[in-house]
């Protein structure tokens, strides 16, 4: 694996109506490391991670909330980092796929994606992994989904059938169509963790 | 994206102090950030309201619920009292967007999300909603998504929310605070018709903050459900959708609530169908007559006529399901 990209120099501020941009201090804990930034308030969590902090495991697909490639965990919940303004997430604990394992000690989801061949080009994979991590926590907490048999049943634990996994992961598109194996990989981890 | 100043409000009073003068409230950002990026919208200042509180669901005496404007869509959908008492609302939320987006999206933001009409989002095309006076490109252009109820040549866009369809059906009330003082606005009166001027979606005034949405209780025994038809199984906006609540006693309809999504400039309340249903038998023939009474007022165009039979079939399936559910219990 290539060494992590060095952070790029800050981009020149976009000249605003007033000819200048007021930056805001932003603190993020990224994959366990405290980072301090001074940002143009237009910068998304995604761009802060990739362009300012050199954390490139998180990917930009659409930049409009439509593909899920940019999914990270913010304080444990899965979000789309492209629609999250970094200033609004000041103080958040951000976890990317790189925070869920490393090449020499893969996390269980990463391991399962490899074992099940749940990728082709791999571009969507970090988002899939973060989304799956968040999704498994939601299911554990009893959160229902669109395909849950009866939303009124608040007592039964969520059973992560393939249909449930498909629905709960529908916010992560895969241009290569690796869906069948993605569902299988996540199912393996859901069963192993339960 | 045009530059803006970012400010973080600490509480409701602080948010109101910072409102006005080109300020725009930032909640989950899932609609606003996209629009700022696309150039659909600009702001001089963003006032971040995510840390002002208003993030709880309160159970009201009598079985109603008061939902804070900053409650996230996922947390609301998972709330036990909402799931038990208002399944139509939980189902509507869960039919919308994706897990990640629901974790970000707030109740207030969902109400105020803008249309997904392709012309509204494409700044190179005329669109009167985005650029007042420029005309409606959807009239003669790509028109499959256009409105069929309360249509106006001024704007053919539909309101995109799922949640709002359930809320109009249930007579939810929006509580606000701001320059006009504290207000309680029924969901059915919050939104403007296209004919009233599509440049703004609602009757809120600039700087007005939604604080809560109140859900009044339903009569015990009332069944409710939401069904959405879309072009793929998940993660897509509604082609059409139906929110319904039905109270059936001894085979007759005591109360009926019907909301339609994807068909009108505002979340649509099907009052004509409701009137036809109440007092009548809870059977297929009466349901069909009631839905047809409403659909007689639909004005489909060249490309969106399919919405009429799809809406009819969906509404009938939902009503039949609710009547059936009531009969079995
Ligand atoms: C890819 C994608 C798919 C989607 N699919 C669906 C779907 O199927 N169904 C559906 O219903 N929605 C869908 N959505 C829309 C999503 O539900 C909305 O974007 C979201 O609910 C908006 O909430 P927010 O908190 O992020 O609002 P923001 O983007 O922060 O704000 C939206 C607007 O509301 C204003 N605002 C927010 N809170 C308040 C308040 N308390 N008082 C006054 N003004 C306020 C803001 O100023 C802004 O004008 C989808 C979105 C995306 C990106
Ligand atoms: S890059 Fe964020 S959803 Fe596509
Ligand atoms: S593996 Fe190529 S996009 Fe999913």
Image (cartoon, coloured by chain):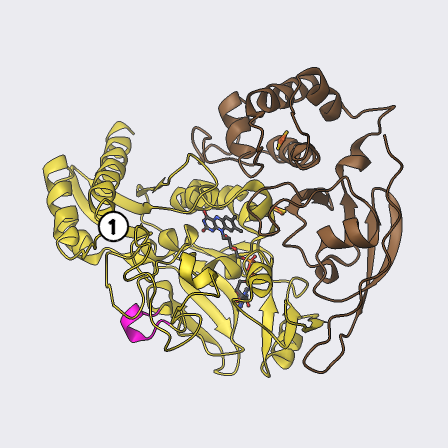
Chain colours: A brown, B yellow
Q: Quadrant of residue B129?
A: bottom left
Residue A181 position, x and y percent, is 60, 20
Of A119 and B329, which appears nearest the observer?
A119
User: Which residues fall within the magenta stretch?
Assistant: B192-198
Please report, as a chain letter, where disc 1 is located: B
Q: State the residue lying farthest toward the front.
A: B124
Q: Are there few (<14), some (14-19), or many (20+) residues within 10 Å of tag 1?
A: some
Could one spot residue A11 in this view of the protein?
yes
Residue B159 position, x and y percent, is 38, 58
In the image, residue B195 above or below residue B158: below
Q: Quadrant of the C terminus of chain A?
A: top right
Q: Is residue B206 magenta?
A: no
Q: Would residue B234 appear left or right of B71 to someone viewing this image?
A: left
Residue B223 position, x and y percent, is 31, 41
Residue A69 position, x and y percent, is 64, 40
Give the labeled residue for mark 1.
B303
Q: Would residue A57 appear left or right of B133 to someone viewing this image?
A: right
Could one spot residue A92 in this view of the protein?
no
Q: Is mark 1 within 8 Å of ligand 1?
A: no
Q: Quadrant of the N terminus of chain A?
A: top right
Counting the numbered discs, the total is 1
In the image, residue B157 above or below residue B163: below
Q: Secondary structure at mark 1?
A: loop
Taking the image as four quarters, which one is ligand 3 found in?
top right
Q: Residue at x 77, y 39 (%)?
A: A57
Q: Residue at x 30, y 75 (%)?
A: B196
């Amino acid at each position: 694996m290539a060494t992590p990209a060095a952070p790029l120099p800050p981009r020149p501020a976009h000249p605003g109506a007033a000819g200048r941009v007021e930056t805001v201090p932003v603190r993020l804990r990224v994959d366990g490391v405290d980072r301090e930034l001074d940002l143009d308030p237009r910068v998304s969590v995604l761009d802060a991670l990739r362009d300012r902090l050199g954390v490139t495991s998180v990917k930009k697909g659409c930049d409009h909330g439509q593909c899920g490639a940019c999914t990270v965990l913010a304080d444990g919940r899965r979000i789309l980092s492209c629609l999250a303004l970094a200033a609004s997430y000041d103080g958040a604990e951000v976890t990317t796929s790189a925070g869920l394992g490393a090449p020499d000690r893969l996390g269980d989801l990463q391991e399962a994606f490899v074992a099940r061949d749940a990728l082709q080009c791999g571009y969507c994979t970090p988002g899939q992994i973060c989304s799956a991590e968040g999704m498994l926590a939601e299911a554990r907490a009893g959160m229902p989904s669109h395909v849950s048999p009866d939303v009124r049943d608040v007592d039964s634990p969520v059973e992560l059938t393939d249909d449930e996994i498909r629905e709960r992961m529908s916010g992560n598109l895969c241009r290569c169509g690796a869906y069948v194996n993605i569902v299988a990989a996540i199912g393996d981890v859901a069963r192993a963790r339960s | 994206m045009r530059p803006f100043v970012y400010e973080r409000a600490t509480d409701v009073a602080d948010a109101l102090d910072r409102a006005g003068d080109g300020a725009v409230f930032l909640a989950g950002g899932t609609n606003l950030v996209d629009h700022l990026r696309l150039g659909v919208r600009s702001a001089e200042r963003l006032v971040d309201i995510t840390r002002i509180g208003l993030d709880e669901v309160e159970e009201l005496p009598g079985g109603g619920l008061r939902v804070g404007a900053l409650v996230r869509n996922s947390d609301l959908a998972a709330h036990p009292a909402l799931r038990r008492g208002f399944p139509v609302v939980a189902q509507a939320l869960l039919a919308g967007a994706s897990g990640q987006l629901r974790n970000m999206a707030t109740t207030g933001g969902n109400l105020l999300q803008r249309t997904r009409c392709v012309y509204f989002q494409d700044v190179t095309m005329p669109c009167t909603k985005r650029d007042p006076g420029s005309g409606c490109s959807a009239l003669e252009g790509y028109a499959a998504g256009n409105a069929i109820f309360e249509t106006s040549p001024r704007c053919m866009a539909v309101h995109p929310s799922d949640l709002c369809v359930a809320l109009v059906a249930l007579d939810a009330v929006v509580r606000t605070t701001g320059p006009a003082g504290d207000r309680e606005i029924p969901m059915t009166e919050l939104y403007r018709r296209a004919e009233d001027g599509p440049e703004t979606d609602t009757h809120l005034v600039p700087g007005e903050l939604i604080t809560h949405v109140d859900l009044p209780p339903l009569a015990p025994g009332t069944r409710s459900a939401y069904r959405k038809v879309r072009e793929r199984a998940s993660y897509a906006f509604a082609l059409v959708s139906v929110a319904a609540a039905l109270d059936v006693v001894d085979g007759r309809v005591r109360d009926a609530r019907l909301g339609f999504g994807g068909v009108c400039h505002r979340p649509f309340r099907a009052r004509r169908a409701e009137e036809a249903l109440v007092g009548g038998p809870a059977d297929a023939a009466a349901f069909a007559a009631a839905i047809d009474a409403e659909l007689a007022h639909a004005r489909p165009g060249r490309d969106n006529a399919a919405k009429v039979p799809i809406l009819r079939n969906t509404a009938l399936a939902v009503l039949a399901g609710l009547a059936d559910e009531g009969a079995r219990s």
